[in-house]
Amino acid sequence: MLSSSSFVKKELNFTKMCFLVNCLKRWKSSQQWLIRQNADPYVEKARIYNYRCRSAFKLLEMNDKTNILMPGLTVVDLGASPGSWSQVAVQKTNADGADKSKPKGTVLSIDKLQIFPIPGATIMSNMDFSTIEAHDKVVEALNGKKVDVVLSDMAPSATGVKELDKDRIIGLCYMAIRFAALVTRNDGNLLIKVWDGKEVPILEMDLERFYKSIKILKPQASRSESSEKFLLARGFKGIQRPLANGRWG
Ligand SMILES: C[S@@+](CC[C@H](N)C(=O)[O-])C[C@H]1O[C@@H](n2cnc3c(N)ncnc32)[C@H](O)[C@@H]1O
């Protein structure tokens, strides 16, 4: 039988071992991340074009195919930190007024994290968009201005449990849809990120109730090993609201 002191020693050794194994695992995955980053052409391109991250090229590519961002449009970017999609949105909508010959757009960037200032964009940092209160604040800030495009690249921090992570991103998608329904002008568009899974077809069906067409996009800049894809919902049909006479309109 083990004496209590040798039992404690054994326990401590086991805890130390677990700690070391975990450190090793973390070190290995950060090494893999570094190797992948260094070999990624979009990381280098982002540095050259002064984008805050490689995601910029996903939006640029999707916009080249669909032309959803144009000078003069009003765009809300959900899950905007660190800010590369907002940088693209500012350029494409001319929200910084860089091109005097074209109409000036508006970009509103929202994230639960800090977003450092982006010339031409209005920033709402530290805002958890999974709450109705956050939606209310943004609706108030828009002051009746209708939105042409809602972008959502929101993604929860991964827990490592795939099914749970997928459920959480779907939850964020429905929050983006709810918000878009409140603020989008008729015929406006919504672009949202999902992680592929069995809920995506249901999400598509729900989007069809509010939008004329739904398209699935997987830009080349989105890593092939990632289950990430984007749903572009075009042509917002509007929502029925109760009228003063009790009817719906
Ligand atoms: C993939 S990153 C977005 C990258 C960004 N599109 C860009 O190009 O810089 C996902 C972002 O979603 C944000 N996010 C996740 N959950 C959120 C929530 N509940 N409310 C607001 N933002 C959220 C994260 O903080 C993170 O910054």
Image (cartoon, rainbow, N blue to C red):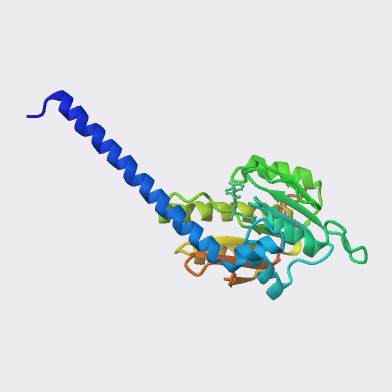
Q: Is residue 75 visible?
A: yes
Position of residue 148 measured from the top left corner of the image (x, y, whole percent):
76, 61
Q: Is residue 219 above or below residue 171?
A: below
> Which residue is at the far left?
1
Count of residue discs: 0
The image quadrant that residue 67 belongs to is bottom right
Q: Quadrant of residue 6?
A: top left
Q: Quadrant of the N terminus?
A: top left
Give 21 or 184, whichever is nearer the viewer: 21
Q: Is residue 248 visible?
A: no
Q: Is 61 above or below relative to 4?
A: below
- As drawn, the residue found furthest toward the top would be 4
| Residue 208: x %, y % from top left | 61, 67
Q: From the image, which quarter does the C terminus lie in?
A: bottom right
Q: Position of residue 202 (x, y in %)?
A: 51, 64
Direction right: furthest residue: 101
The residue that appears at 66% across and 71% down in the rendered structure is 61
Look at 81% across and 46% down and name the residue there: 143
Q: Nearer the viewer, residue 119 or 122?
A: 119
The structure residue drawn at horizontal position 59% and vertical position 45%, both measured from the top left corner, is: 130
In front here: 183 or 19? 19
Coordinates of residue 115 in the picture (x, y in percent): 68, 46
Residue placed farthest to the bottom in the image? Answer: 65
